[in-house]
Amino acid sequence: MAQTTDSAVQPAAWYSALPRAGYAALKRIAVQGDWFEVYQVQEGIYALYESGHFQEVISYLLVGADKALLVDTGLGMGNIRKVAEQLTNLPIAVVNTHSHFDHIGDNWRFEQVYILNHPTAVKRLAAGATHAELAGEVEPGANARPYPAGFDPAAYTIPPCTFETVEEGHVFDLGNRRLRVIYTPGHSDDSIMLADDGNRLLFTGDTFYPASLYVFFASPDPVDQLLDTYRRTMERLAGEFSGYTLLCSHNEPLCSGGMLAQAAQAFAAIQAGRAPDEVGNTGMKKYQFDGFAIITR
Ligand SMILES: [Zn+2]
């Protein structure tokens, strides 16, 4: 998600939407620690959900036959490595869906981290994030539960990490599960998804989830161009993955692949001037659709 407290974007009482309905059908796994809620999505797939913070980030641990892969490391407020190591004894590699702070927060705790070979991603992981960049994430009201033991909001930073880069088409082979890297620019220019073709699953990062989608706020490019990039990505995804189950990185973990076509049509509608927008108090535009929204600057 983007860093914003715009009232059209982030409802003041965000926690009133909790608990979200999608978790009721999933098996809750008890873990030590006071920050992550852990759910088994299916055999070998766990959602690590930061429900105490308004970003409601979901990272996924995939436990294969030979290796484990952690898709994103969350906000870096709680120790995600400690949680993941309660779920598997296998070595755990990390892959980031993109380089936004809420997906890379605990990268520094891991020896093996992968991200797309893209200048935006490389720059961010090499630099980490300063407290000034993150201050909006620890303002009063950002958390609905106490922060985890040992976390000082006044000192919140994201340390740099060591990492390796991958390209579109790279495959992470966990022994009994393979994850294929798909380049999906739109939310950011360094976004990827991970396709588990054997099980018809798609880990979508922030490029699609059933909530407000943010159109690449950091880019200086014209909004029309950014919408066009996002629409092309969604059209490609709708063509290839409509029959898959989506595993999303914020709010609700599971979503139907049929939503990809709806998202592609939504971007096309905005571009064609057929979608009504609502302007927030910082000038951002929000377009509401059935089951998700699209937010541009
Ligand atoms: Zn995010």
Image (tube, rainbow, N blue to C red):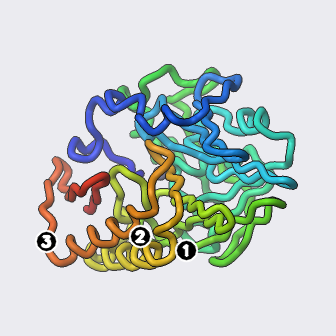
Measure the C-alpha gap from mark 3 to mark 2.
20 Å
Q: Which residue is mark 3?
A: 274
Measure the C-alpha gap from mark 1 to mark 2.
10 Å
Classify 10 Å Cα crowding around label 2: few (below 14), some (14-19), many (20 and above): many
The answer to whether residue 135 is seen in the rendering is: no
Q: Which residue is mark 1?
A: 183
Of badges 3 and 1, the one in the foreground is 3
Question: Callout 3: helix, strand or loop?
Answer: loop
Q: Is mark 2 within 8 Å of ligand 1?
A: no
Q: Which quadrant of the structure image shows residue 80?
A: top right
N-term-proximal mark, 3 vs 2: 2
Taking the spot 71% from the left edge, 45% from the top edge, the residue there is 43
Residue type for callout 1 = Tyr
When the figure is inspected, residue 297 is found, relative to residue 102, above or below; the finding is below
Q: Which residue is mark 2?
A: 186
On the image, the x and y values in percent for residue 221 come to 33, 76
